[in-house]
Image (cartoon, rainbow, N blue to C red):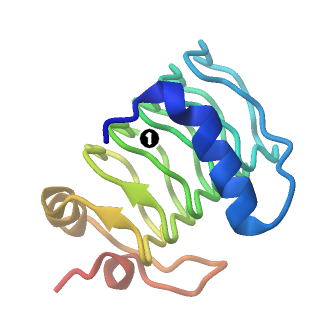
Amino acid sequence: MVCGILCVGVLLGMLSLATGAAIAAEDFTYAELRNRSFAGEDLTGSSLAAANANEADFTDADLSETILTKGVFEKAHMAGVNLTQSFADRVSFNGADLRNAIVVDAIMTSTTFYEADITGADFSGTILDRYQIKQMCEHADGVNPVTGVATRDSLGCG
């Protein structure tokens, strides 16, 4: 079944049911978020599908259980961001600052991280394309200060 961005509301509802909690999610689908600041904000369960978030500031923001499909987060400031259980298909994190990010149990297929700083990021249990894992392992370093997991270990680097 091909869903696309029109299914965002259904997916958000499923996330809410799966967690057993009501999610006060925001809808930023197709939004122009370039250079906006969401630093430290709780955006749990929100949709940023197809959003242009180039150079936006998500430092220490909670983006857990969010939908980022087809979003563009190039050169975004995402140090310390929580992306646990997020869905990011065909997303660009190229050049983004993902230092100490928590990207646990997420789906990040067809997503790119070229020239992204992933020092200390934890990707435990996250589904990533093998090619991206290989690329990220070439410069993976550090230990996440919250989870205590080494970036290389979370990616399964040899």
Q: Look at the image and tell me whether residue 105 can be seen.
A: yes
Q: Could you tell me which quadrant the C terminus lies in? A: bottom left
Question: What residue lies at 22% left-to-right and 80% top-to-bottom?
Answer: 157
Q: Give the residue number, with chain letter if any, for mark 1.
A: 96
Seen in the image, is 89 located left or right of residue 131? Answer: right
Q: Could you tell me which quadrant the N terminus lies in? A: top left
Q: Look at the image and tell me whether residue 63 can be seen.
A: no
Please tell me how crowded label 1 is: few (under 14), some (14-19), or many (20+) other residues with Cα within 10 Å. many
Classify residue 124 by image quadrant: bottom left
Q: Nearer the viewer, residue 157 or 19?
A: 19
Residue type at the position of mark 1: Ala
Question: What residue lies at 58% left-to-right and 57% top-to-bottom?
Answer: 83
Q: Nearer the viewer, residue 38 or 79?
A: 38
Give residue 111's position: percent from left, percent from top: 30, 45
Classify residue 27 by image quadrant: top right
> As drawn, which residue projects farthest toward the front?
1
* Figure disc tally: 1
